[in-house]
Amino acid sequence: MVPDERIKAPENFEQAADMIIKEGDDLMAANHGSEGLDPKTYHTPENHIKRLQERAKEIADVFNLTTEQRKLAAIAISFHDTIINYDAPDLESIVGMIMRHRGAREGDKPMGEQGNEALSAKAMLEAMEHMNRTAGKTIFTQRQMQIADQAVEVTYPDVDFGP
């Protein structure tokens, strides 16, 4: 008998959020972990995401955040650096630097809506929308997805939400 490999639909927001967090963590590890496609020194699940999650729990306690707010923050943390595209430094230059493809919104330098922050947020939103489809109901509302999206966008160094 073949084990059932179908994804079990979540029964509630908390279950769905935990599944999305794991998906972000897995994508981060696959892209940047020690065995990933493009291993990173500082952007690993262990050295970056885990530490941010721990710090976020402490801050959430101070601000007495709700379970929903905590889960949305954890989702954004999990996904915020899943995409890190960059141009490698000129190996012939002693001052060569990696140039990350930064950007969350139109006008952000250098990549705008095709920047790492925008692409990481897009992957997160696609996972949340897929979870809604898998559940056959709205688990993540448009407002919750907007909050998570903005949480990823603010990781762009020069974020500007306007007035």
Image: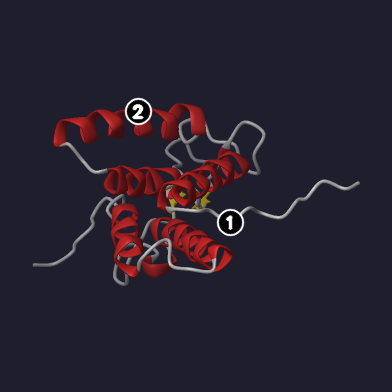
Amino acid type of the residue tagged 2 in the rendering: Glu
Q: Secondary structure at mark 2?
A: helix
The vertical placement of 63 against 16, above or below, is above
Residue 89 visible in the current orientation = no
Q: Do the CB atoms of the residues marked 1 and 2 lie less than 8 Å apart?
A: no
| Colour scheme shown | secondary structure
Q: Secondary structure at mark 1?
A: loop
Residue 106, percent from left and from top: 32, 72
Of pointers 1 and 2, the one earlier in the residue sequence = 1
Numbered tag placed on residue 54 in the rendering: 2
> How many numbered marks, from 0 up?
2
Amino acid type of the residue tagged 1 in the rendering: Ala
Numbered tag placed on residue 117 in the rendering: none
Q: Name which quarter of the figure residue 140 lies in.
A: bottom left
Residue 42, percent from left and from top: 46, 31
The vertical placement of 83 against 108, above or below, is above
Q: Is residue 30 left or right of residue 98?
A: right
The vertical placement of 129 against 37, above or below, is below
Residue 59, percent from left and from top: 22, 32
Image quadrant occupied by the C terminus: bottom left
Q: Residues within 10 Å of mark 1 (few under 14, many from 20)?
A: some
Q: Residues within 10 Å of mark 2 (few under 14, many from 20)?
A: few
Residue 59 visible in the current orientation = yes
Residue in view at x 42 percent, y 59 percent: 121
The residue closer to the viewer here, 108 or 140, is 140
In the current view of this chain or complex, which residue is farthest to the left? 163
Residue 150, percent from left and from top: 29, 59
What's the CA distance linking mark 1 and mark 2?
Answer: 27 Å
Residue in view at x 46 percent, y 41 percent: 96
The residue closer to the viewer here, 75 or 104, is 75
Q: Nearer the viewer, mark 1 or mark 2?
A: 1
Numbered tag placed on residue 9 in the rendering: 1
